Image: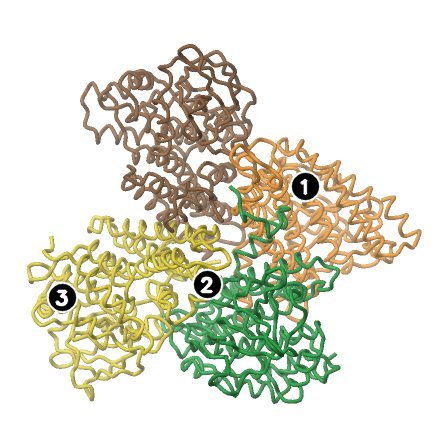
Chain colours: A orange, B brown, C yellow, D green
Amino acid sequence: MKGAIDMTDAQVDRAEWWRQLTETATALAEVFEKRSLDNYERGRFVSENIEDLKAAGITAINVPAELGGFDATLAENIEIIRILAHGCGSTAFTFAIHAVITGSLRTEIGRATKERVFGAVRDGGFVIGPFTDESSGSNWTMPSTVARRHDDGFVIDGVKHFATGYEAATHLLVTAGLTDEHLTPPFNLAAFLVEAGADGVSVQREWGGFAMPMTGSHSLAIKGLQMDAEDMLFPEGIAPLFVMSRQQWGNYCFAAVFLGLAERAYELAVERTRGRSNTSISDLARLPGIQFAVGSMRGSLASMRSLLHRYATEHVEPGDDLVGFVAQTCIPKYYVVNEAEQVVAKAFNVIGGSGIQAGSRIGQLWRDVKAGPLLPFTNDICREFIGKHTLGINPIEQPRWL
Amino acid sequence: MKGAIDMTDAQVDRAEWWRQLTETATALAEVFEKRSLDNYERGRFVSENIEDLKAAGITAINVPAELGGFDATLAENIEIIRILAHGCGSTAFTFAIHAVITGSLRTEIGRATKERVFGAVRDGGFVIGPFTDESSGSNWTMPSTVARRHDDGFVIDGVKHFATGYEAATHLLVTAGLTDEHLTPPFNLAAFLVEAGADGVSVQREWGGFAMPMTGSHSLAIKGLQMDAEDMLFPEGIAPLFVMSRQQWGNYCFAAVFLGLAERAYELAVERTRGRSNTSISDLARLPGIQFAVGSMRGSLASMRSLLHRYATEHVEPGDDLVGFVAQTCIPKYYVVNEAEQVVAKAFNVIGGSGIQAGSRIGQLWRDVKAGPLLPFTNDICREFIGKHTLGINPIEQPRWL
Amino acid sequence: MPSTDYVALARELAPVFAQRAAAHDKEGSFPQENLDDLVRSGYTAMTVPTRFGGGGATLAQLCQAQQILAGACASTAFAVNMHVHGLAMLAELGGATTEWACRSVVEDGAVIAGGFSEPGIGGNWWHPTTTATPVAGGYELNGRKGFFTGFPGATLLFLSASQTDDRGIGQPVAFLVPKPTDSTDSGVRVSSAWDAAGMRATGSHSLALENFFIPERYLVGESGSLPMLFMTGVHWAWCSFTSVFVGIARAALEHVAASQRNRTLTVIGKPNAHLPGIQFRVAEMATKLAVAEAHLNAAIDADHSTDVDPLAHYIDMSLMKTTVSSLCQEIVTIGMQVQGGSALLSADPLQRMYRDVVTGLLVPPAADVALEWAGKQALGVPVFDEPRWVG
Amino acid sequence: MPSTDYVALARELAPVFAQRAAAHDKEGSFPQENLDDLVRSGYTAMTVPTRFGGGGATLAQLCQAQQILAGACASTAFAVNMHVHGLAMLAELGGATTEWACRSVVEDGAVIAGGFSEPGIGGNWWHPTTTATPVAGGYELNGRKGFFTGFPGATLLFLSASQTDDRGIGQPVAFLVPKPTDSTDSGVRVSSAWDAAGMRATGSHSLALENFFIPERYLVGESGSLPMLFMTGVHWAWCSFTSVFVGIARAALEHVAASQRNRTLTVIGKPNAHLPGIQFRVAEMATKLAVAEAHLNAAIDADHSTDVDPLAHYIDMSLMKTTVSSLCQEIVTIGMQVQGGSALLSADPLQRMYRDVVTGLLVPPAADVALEWAGKQALGVPVFDEPRWVG
């Protein structure tokens, strides 16, 4: 935080501020990679890394300019996430959740809430949002968590999975379905700002994920959680529109994590090959198979970077066709996470058998990269949205098919 | 062993014997899968499983008929390995090493050695071969382990990696380069039969592999290991020809492991989908994306099975063109291990986010399957051998390229 | 066992067909002289049962022979394919019409062309829109047929239509009928002559059937039995179709390998075959070809008896065709890259293979339906349930 | 900024070119009337610098306009491509020959065709085997040129050859020379007229240069400077080449999507677009197209100044072309599957796109060399080291 505040005080040039943020992120990524080698197998939450990101002002990049913040663009968020992913997928993904929420929320909420959230973030706050409801199939339009009106406020009950970053969180964004009879899904969806440590939220099952093991993505039990009226972030019926109109944040920021993993895999393949020899090959880098693989990964990465950059700069705000916009935002997410898998596989093949040794970084990348297609929007949903939109069919019309 | 011996005593019909072997393997695979869920993360060697395989007579399938054994064909070895891989990749791979050695050795050695090896195997012996020499790049024609003549025998020194199954081994097949001046690589290669526990063999580094973690594939230090003349399995200069003419065993048996992993991933995807629902989808199995993915995996698996079966029955013995034969044996290995990766990825996508939960079987399959392309023959060597052979170029001529 | 070695016969005919292929491809003309050679040499009697004087060839022999023809001239192989595999399916059905057809083939050199594709039904061959209306002495057919491969050379037409049963439900029926020789007013009209990018010499015209009268005796099988007949005999259809594409892919690999062994660039001074990039791509081709062959052969060798569930049998054969034809298209595409710019020249047969092999992705069974049914079956969802999907 | 909106101009011309495309494709005839339209409308002056009266179009404008033409008639776009991008490269070079050429284009409607491919050199354009022998007043060229795209419509020829320097080493040189109008004994002979499976209307003849005299003044640049000139200006070449294939791929997607929205199968009673299999494949096409466009655009927008290492610049552009042209070929192939059997009919432009787009895999830069150089550079291995590989 110190860094960020000093910056504003000194009215530092924004470009210089950005240069310092990316330099710091790059330096931290190297530190995070060393920690990952120690902690990955144990699945220890990356709390130390999140503290470092807070201290460097990186968690505050989305604080609005009017509150003295850097007010990072979506493209800038993506760049930071990509850099962090070079060092540690878990950290990058945990940060991405915070970035998605803070980045998308700042333009959509009233002054008071904005000061409440971003004042906290400026001072080291960390916001997470466990969005996956028990047995909802990741479909946020059908929440199983419910919010009942009670006095002037609400009482929330439910189970939330994948509460990434819970241990570092100062605030949680909790979605739930209002039980009001006049509201039908998805318009019953509401979002609440919950202070960490609130009564009624507890860890039901600790995270022990196969991929991204250090994200602390616990399952939370929410029982009788009491909310005031002003904790509800949007007016009744508006939350679904907010979610729809901000899908670019989730889709692009998630894609950035997996692009970063693929880039690191490529670097490792080059590092492990350049100038290396064995009893039969005097210079591995002079083998054509290695050269072709490296060349092909370069081509893939250039494609992925171009695509994500293009969307993060040119497809940032929805126009009149909100659903069509959402369909478009699926494109970089769909392509990047799947292509990243192919790049990591190819890099692993270049590294060869030594990559199988325990604690190897490429093994961690191989595990982490598999999370990409499983995060929303999943492959099949992406294909459906993109395909229907291209064919002039509304992706959310019913019946879905014949 | 009891099983196997009873069989021969009773002169049981071979088909019935085979039926019992596959049934037992299938039942054991289920047991192994449960154990895998407990032991995978800890990387505990599958000693219990190997003991079960011994007790069931499965480790003895390659004992020659003249010694009362089942004398399994290559295709039968592959079938057993594939079945075992459904339950546990580490067990299937560890068994595959033993199967490759026992299967290929039985026709190539003299009567005395045969009785020594297969008498032991019939009685529960387990033979492994750590073939990867320190800094040899997995190229067996350039061993860094050396055998010096001493008195009437030899003294061996070197470091061997990937000593899969070491803890269960009763015998080790150790290759080394003879230091005799008149022998140039690869004709200086020699193979020795070493009893487990011999002085001069010790674990230098314990296995902690990212994939196949329960194979106990330690690195071994071989220091001053003394061998008698009769411990050398082949006459001087013959070992390389043996290795070449038996590559079908390694290539096909390894492929069988990864085919089995892919088959199990497919089954899990079906199990996790059939009849399942969530709050938004009443029947996951009725989603077109799931159906297409399942159909496409079925097609891939049918291709892989057809290919491996065809080669294991029709390309089993080298003809006059030994190098050409080796090139052909690369085809199923190359295709199956890489296609298996794609199938496991697709199955993982069908299973979705729940597959990321710790201890999930699909996560184990995702890790194990990555070992496929890294095992010899690696992708680039396969491509080189297959391509050169198809183009009428001898894959081992020098210079390799322009 | 057939007395004729049809695979050897295919090898004998192939070089001549290969020579004629470029001209027919250029003109889009039907290779009648090839068909005449196939009739004269007895190739077209291959799958006629021996009891009717035919060769009684097995599925494996048929497929191997067709692969060889396809490597020389894919259009010829494809044009005769309905004849050779259709006869085998008819032979399993038996009956008077079959016997008559078989004897015509052996004795008179009859040639069958078949039409089951129609505009507007996609790959759903079990739902023909051509109607068969019972009239005195037979049926009158009205409708349209597309992709009537081999029509110009045929003497007999094998046709599907829908007959409305007493419950008012359309049931597919089939006819095997002499092709009208009078081109005017016969009821069969070429509504659009075949003009396409690939398989140009197959004469796969579109036909209009206009009050086409078919005498009763040319009905094949019983009304409504067609789908089951087709499912149980589908290995003849999908394996022989697939063989055509495997034959193209193998010929492409052989052609590319030979070219690269012979082509020497001045700047490298050795045949291109020594370039690792060429080797790696050729390895991809060879590997995919081995997979395609193995999967096709496994389908040929599979249990085709009635012990097997007909739907499972149909799905396995369909998945094989889908997987293998896709591999074949990939093989030829990689071949184009290996060969380089000269691959595009009309003088290089590879470009014809590239245009012909893509047909494998387009002919029945439709890949999406094959995948859908395979998925549904594995997942325990009945394939004809409505709605077709739920989400 | 150019005063003409060339992208709008391309949009204006495209529908007419699209109408003419099938006939030229069928006949393999050169679309001279299209070229005339391009000259008349000022399209061919697009990349002539404004100081010479041209449009001074940017790379981005050139590429966008070429994509639109390619979607209508890929052969026309490809035939004019050497002209439009070649002029931009020449303009960067400057000099008297360039000025003369530019003024000819603006004032006389001159059109350039270029020949850098030769039989026997593969993709190694920096090693021409055509010789340029100094003679009184100029040079005499002898050799062979392949794939001389646009030759029939050209008035100027842009040619490479090798001149032996005083150390006896061949150095590539280039000439820009009026095309001889006298077809006999001019020294330039069409040795083989273009006849190919794709890009049929490009007139990409093979030429024999036989004692072809070129006056001194038509030499472009200095002897030996050609490779560096080409490397630093390569974005004009590879981005415009690639634009042709992206244009085809986009047109294929639009055509397929429109077809599937309009095509209703009787058995499903709704447009095919409602089938999930169609949707998923169209999604693959749309995604790959977005990737292709983004990668191409990133290459167009990249830093092309001399601040960038020329080799790295050349490699980045080559990798882009390799990656993107491969995506474009995949897009059209998937489109064929979506469209089904009718895609093969000559009446469906998709089959022409399938034949045209594969050219992207075959034209320079060669994919294997691009990957090799990209790999070597990343791995710290000099790209011209000998032996080329060690193992």
Q: Are marks 2 and 1 on the same chain?
A: no
Q: Position of residue D344 (x, y in %)?
A: 38, 72
Q: Which mark lies nearer to you, 2 or 1?
A: 2
Density class for disc 1 (Cα within 10 Å; few <14, some 14-19, many ≥20) is many
In the image, what residue type sits under mark 3?
Ser
In the image, what residue type sits under mark 2?
Gly
Instruction: Determine whether the residue tagged by mark 1 lies in a helix, strand or loop.
Output: loop
Q: Which mark lies nearer to you, 2 or 3?
A: 2
> Which of the labelled discs sits on residue A88, or is there none?
1
In the image, what residue type sits under mark 1?
Cys
> Which of the labelled discs sits on residue C41, or is there none?
3
Q: Nearer the viewer, residue B391 or C109?
A: B391
Q: Nearer the viewer, residue B303 or D194?
A: D194
- Outermost front residue: D136
Is residue D234 visible in the rendered image? The answer is no
Q: Position of residue D264 (x, y in %)?
A: 41, 74
Chain bearing mark 2 = C
Instruction: Determine whether the residue tagged by mark 2 lies in a helix, strand or loop.
Output: loop
- Please identify the quadrant where the N terminus of chain D is shown: bottom right
Instruction: Determine whether the residue tagged by mark 3 lies in a helix, strand or loop.
Output: loop
Instruction: Report which residue position mark 2 lands on.
Output: C340
Density class for disc 2 (Cα within 10 Å; few <14, some 14-19, many ≥20) is some
- Outermost right residue: A10
| Residue lying at 7% horizontally and 69% vertically, measured from the top left | C107
Q: Which mark lies nearer to you, 1 or 3?
A: 3
Left or right: where does residue C299 sit relative to residue A268? left
Chain bearing mark 1 = A
C99 up-or-down from D16: above or below: above
Q: Are marks 2 and 3 on the same chain?
A: yes
Q: CA distance from mark 1 to mark 3?
A: 71 Å
